[in-house]
Amino acid sequence: MEKVAIIGSGCAGLTAALYAARANLQPLVLTGRHPGGLLTTTTVVENFPGFPEGIDGYELMVRLQKQAERFGARVQFGTVENVDLSGQPFHLVVDGETIDAETIIIASGAGHRHLELESEIKLENKGVTYCATCDGALPMFRNQALAVVGGGDSACEEAMYLTRFGSIVYLIHRRDSLRASKIMAERTLAHSKIKPIWDSIVTDVMDVSQGKVTGVRVKNVKTNIERVLECSGVFVAIGHTPNTQIFKGLIDMDEQGYIVPKRGTATNVPGVFVAGDCSDRVYRQAVTAAGLGCAAAIEAERFLAARNE
Ligand code: NAP
């Protein structure tokens, strides 16, 4: 029987693990499909406190895992397929095996949002990708025109990263100003290789018949004029959707699937807590996820203490 099972191994999950481990609760962390979470796919994290020169996202997560393990956290590679929260103990089905737990911290994060185009799906991994850090250096993208879709910090980060490889990077955004933080937006727009394509949406990724990306059809939403931008890669960076499907109908969530805590990190099910991007549609920062992970672990510890009084 686990005292604390933590679903997810991003900033929220591993910080919860660190705090729960230091409370002597030997938490079990279930990594999900992407150990370390989305931060492992970013380049330099410049805004995590304590790293004045910035820190590589992957390295930050490796360090955080080591720190949690040092105090007794156990990290198990696995994906939670099903949960039974109808009574104590809770049951989690992880890759076919059932795990019982007295408390659960949901820190399942969020996944990349898609453009929802048929051609996008057909050309995924054939030039369409959701992670420049993971794929940008591939030979197929070198010295080629590339397109990034989105206007937030992620899109700017992807575009900046891709300037290392591409001959030109189109930044296609549906409005005429970036949503990204001021510093990121200024840096991005000042780069000589980045060409913003304002007020535009992607209506098609070409060419499905060739089985590779040769360009994108974009439509200016103000003029309705369509044109084709030739490019060899499309990097979609239009935000995220929370990884909460398995909790649907069990844990209170909003219409987009973000878990809505009842109070602090407590959910509608006593003993189940939530932290990080799967419940945060506002801040979505590494440091806020870490803070919520800490809070959830403290709440889980208090819940267990109260039960055993
Ligand atoms: P985001 O801030 O939600 O931005 C998503 C962007 O995609 C927006 O510009 C949005 O357009 C656009 N978009 C959404 N759906 C679209 C669609 N269907 N078609 C076309 N465009 C669409 O997401 P994010 O950039 O991934 O950032 C998420 C959070 O992580 C933010 O809080 C961000 O600050 C943080 N982050 C920080 C860093 C850093 O500090 N180093 C790096 C990456 C991310 P609209 O603007 O019109 O809504």
Image: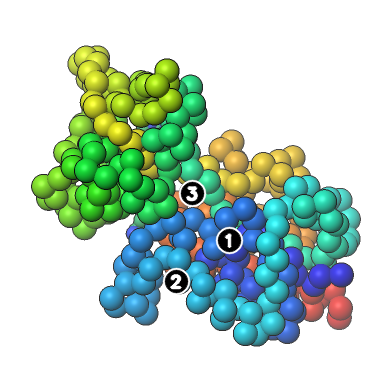
Q: Is disc 2's CB within 8 Å of ligand 1?
A: no
Q: Is residue 205 above or below residue 17?
A: above
Rendered location of residue 242, percent (x, y): 56, 46
Contact, mark 2 vs mark 1 (Cβ under 8 Å): no
The circle drawn on residue 281 is 3
Dot in front, 3 or 2 = 2
- Disc with the residue nearer the chain's start (3 vs 2): 2
Q: Residues within 10 Å of mark 1 (few under 14, many from 20)?
A: many
* Residue 170 percent coordinates (x, y): 22, 37
Kind of residue at badge 3: Arg
Q: Nearer the viewer, residue 58 or 139?
A: 139
Q: Amino acid at mark 2?
A: Glu
Tally of numbered tags? 3
Residue 35 circle label: 1
On the image, numbered disc 2 is attached to which residue?
A: 59
Q: Residues within 10 Å of mark 3 (few under 14, many from 20)?
A: some
